[in-house]
Image (tube, rainbow, N blue to C red):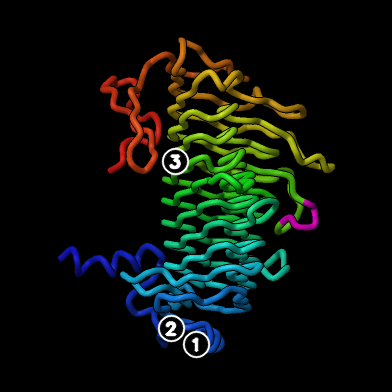
Amino acid sequence: MRAFLFPLLLLSFVGLSPLSFGQVFKVKDAKGLKKAIAKLRPGGHILLAPGHYGSGYVLKGLRGSRSRPIILEGTPGKSLPLFEGGEEGFHLISCHFLVLRRLHVRGCQANAINADDGGDLKKPARGLVFSQLLLEKTGPRGNHDALKLSGLADFTVRDCVFRAWGGSAIDMVGCRKGKIQRCRFEGLPGFSQASGVQTKGGSRDILIQGNLFLNAGSRAVNLGGSTDLRFFRPKIQEFEARRIKVFGNWFSGSRSPIAFVSSSECLVQRNTIAYPEKWVLRILQEQDAKGFKPCQKSRFENNLVLFDQRVKKVVNVGPRTLPKTFVFKKNLWFCKEGKRKPRLPSREVGGIYRLDPRCKKDQQGRWIPFSKDKKIQGIGAGKVR
């Protein structure tokens, strides 16, 4: 029964139904892939055999529908098809309801995958799904992103691995109503890795959930940023980012795992943050243009924070911000050395201090608490199930 249900469950993960498929193109080389892309229609399905496919694929104006998405994927149970080198692996321009799944993109100089709205700032690309991708060694330095998303709505990034990049593993400009779930972000030496996930340029209503961040950049999650005003979508707003929810993630390392930057109404809740290099979180204002409000009104709640002597200041507060509007509630703070209580920019409600959660690192790099103290129930990302 379980084997029978698995294909149906997999389809439900990306909003598909067994009846959504149209013509299937089985492809084994780059030439065949280019021919298949030219023939794609709603419901079209490209199935790639293992092999090397080069890079530089531009998919423009492909329009599936919610019930009949276009799918480009590697063959289930086989080695991932490899797209390697060049400027970009894929560039998706004004595509709708398109699924990229089970692909390996490596060694691109600019971006591994670039998806945008074609420059029409008022008409987002809708319904894109990025699933089970391995994106690695992008850059290696400078503003070069593994997954660059500009002007997307109702999108999903799920069960992907990001390993070594220049700018951001995922960089969002003017994106809304998206989900980033169950991904692994792993920084490596030799790559600049400015941030793991960045939401800026008017991005809003994004869920970042259940991911693992391992030394994932100077700022593992950058809630906001500093965007050229020409690129805001759909128009210039008062904040770089708004209503971003960071829930149930694991963080290990990074100069600062969390940064609130020219943002508002963000929620960082039930995450486990282990041993950052300098700060636990930052509150900054990096957008200086007229009409933008100070970074303000966000929440940091029910997080489990482990830190050591490298963290001299738990929260780094920059100028032109409103740190007293931030809410800190029921976080557990444990310093490995000594009995330090964190100094926060506003009074914390129900904070837990100096209680050892007895965390141990699992094989995936997650820090898991083993204390049976009832005070830590509902704190942190929880045990892996």
Which amino acid, by three-letter code, is at mark 2? Lys
Mark 3 belongs to which amino acid?
Answer: Asn
Q: Which mark is residue 32?
A: 1
Residue beneath the point at 75% across and 49% down: 227
Disc 1 crowd rating (10 Å Cα; few below 14, some 14-19, many 20+) is some
Helix, strand or loop under label 2 = loop
Question: Is residue 171 shown above or below 347?
Answer: below
Q: Is residue 179 left or right of residue 166?
A: left
Q: Quadrant of residue 304?
A: top left
In the picture, which quadrant includes the C terminus?
Answer: top left
Q: Point out the stretch of residues depicted in magenta.
A: 228-232
Do we see residue 151 in this rendering? no
Q: Which disc number belongs to residue 307?
A: none
x, y (%) of residue 50? 40, 75
Question: Is residue 229 one of those drawn in magenta?
Answer: yes
Sequence order check, earlier mark of 3 and 1: 1
Q: CA distance from mark 3 to mark 1?
A: 40 Å
To which residue does mark 2 refer?
28
- Who is closer to the viewer here, 149 or 289? 149
Q: Specify which label sits upstream in the sequence, 2 or 3.
A: 2
Mark 3 or mark 1, which is nearer to you? 1
Q: Nearer the viewer, residue 113 or 157?
A: 113
| Residue type for callout 1 | Gly
Residue reaching furthest to the right: 290
Disc 2 crowd, CA 10 A, few/some/many (<14, 14-19, 20+): some
**Main secondary structure of the magenta stretch:** helix
Queried whether the magenta region covers residue 314, the answer comes back as: no
Q: Is residue 49 visible?
A: yes
The spot of residue 198 in percent (x, y) is: 61, 47
The residue at which mark 3 appears reads as: 249
